[in-house]
Image (spheres, rainbow, N blue to C red):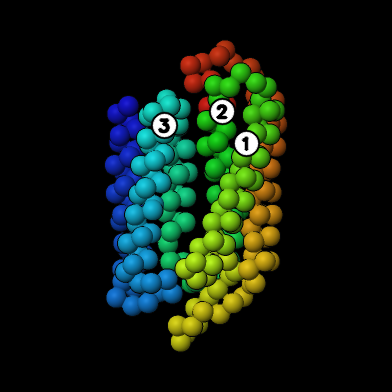
């Protein structure tokens, strides 16, 4: 329990420090997403993710490991920064890396299920694919209602104007493809790793707790 509290405060500090340091030069100017308003919202959402993750771990006694707290911290840090319009294909990099980290978290949440490891990995894969679909629906809805330029790939030119470099449909399909492939890679690699690993006596943490 003390370890969880320590992780919580460390992550809150790191998220606050990181978001402020990244966005500080843009706080008084437009960064393509609303300046101060976007920076404040980014920090709030990142902290909310960490708090919810910690609360779920505590409430349901999932016993997330250190790597899972690291994964959710990285996801929170990278998902709400104003780098989408500054770094080409930043969004595509996230759609490769984050589904793999989310797969590890999802797999850990199913550790107490008394089913074959193959079914746990299959469920993990489809859970992540479903999350990708929900995420893309949310992006579409926010674009329609608030015009946030979440779908499609945009870059800021020297004059501060957004330039479309990938159309929304291609962006959505590419994101889904990258995310599904990443989750499938996690499922396959984990399956073959567990097959080759010597069988150990059951522990309180359950099978797959360290993946």
Residue 145 vs residue 166: left or right?
left
Q: Residues within 10 Å of mark 2 (few under 14, many from 20)?
A: many
Q: Residues within 10 Å of mark 1 (few under 14, many from 20)?
A: many
Position in image of residue 209 (x %, y %): 53, 27
- Which quarter of the rendered picture does the C terminus lie within? top right
Residue 12 vs residue 188: left or right?
left
Report the residue at 69% width, 49% height from top. Answer: 181
Q: Are marks 1 and 2 in contact (CB under 8 Å)?
A: yes
Instruction: Give the numbered dot on residue 110.
Output: 2
Position in image of residue 133 (x %, y %): 62, 51
Q: Which of 52 and 141 lies nearest the eye of the viewer?
A: 141
Q: Quadrant of residue 80?
A: bottom left
Tell which circle, 3 or 1, labels the residue nearer the N-terminal end: 3
Disc 3: which residue: 57
Disc 1: which residue: 124
Report the residue at 65% width, 34% height from top. Answer: 123
Element carrying mark 3? helix
- Which quarter of the rendered picture does the N terminus lie within? top left
Instruction: Give the numbered dot on residue 62.
Output: none
Tell which circle, 1 or 2, labels the residue nearer the N-terminal end: 2
Tell which circle, 2 or 3, labels the residue nearer the N-terminal end: 3
Position in image of residue 76 (x %, y %): 43, 51
Between marks 2 and 3, how big is the CA–CA gap?
12 Å
Q: Residues within 10 Å of mark 3 (few under 14, many from 20)?
A: some
Between marks 3 and 1, how big is the CA–CA gap?
18 Å
Give the answer, above or below, for where 28 lies relative to 39: below
Between marks 1 and 2, how big is the CA–CA gap?
8 Å
Report the residue at 41% width, 31% height from top. Answer: 57
């Amino acid at each position: 329990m003390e370890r969880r509290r320590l992780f919580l405060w460390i992550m809150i500090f790191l998220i606050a420090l990181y978001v402020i340091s990244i966005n500080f030069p843009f706080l008084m100017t437009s960064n393509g997403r609303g300046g101060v308003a976007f920076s404040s919202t980014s920090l709030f959402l990142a902290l909310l993710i960490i708090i919810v993750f910690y609360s779920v771990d505590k409430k349901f006694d999932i016993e997330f490991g250190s790597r899972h707290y690291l994964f959710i911290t990285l996801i929170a840090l990278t998902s709400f920064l104003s780098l989408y319009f500054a770094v080409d294909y930043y969004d595509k990099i996230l759609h490769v890396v984050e589904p793999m980290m989310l797969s590890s978290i999802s797999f850990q949440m199913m550790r107490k299920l008394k089913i074959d490891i193959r079914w746990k990995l299959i469920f993990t894969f489809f859970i992540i694919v479903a999350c990708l679909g929900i995420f893309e629906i949310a992006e579409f809805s926010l674009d329609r209602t608030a015009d946030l330029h979440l779908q499609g790939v945009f870059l800021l030119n020297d004059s501060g104007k957004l330039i479309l470099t990938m159309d929304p449909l291609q962006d959505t399909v590419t994101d889904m493809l990258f995310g599904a492939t990443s989750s499938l890679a996690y499922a396959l690699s984990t399956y073959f790793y567990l097959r080759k690993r010597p069988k150990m006596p059951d522990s309180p943490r359950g099978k797959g707790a360290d993946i």
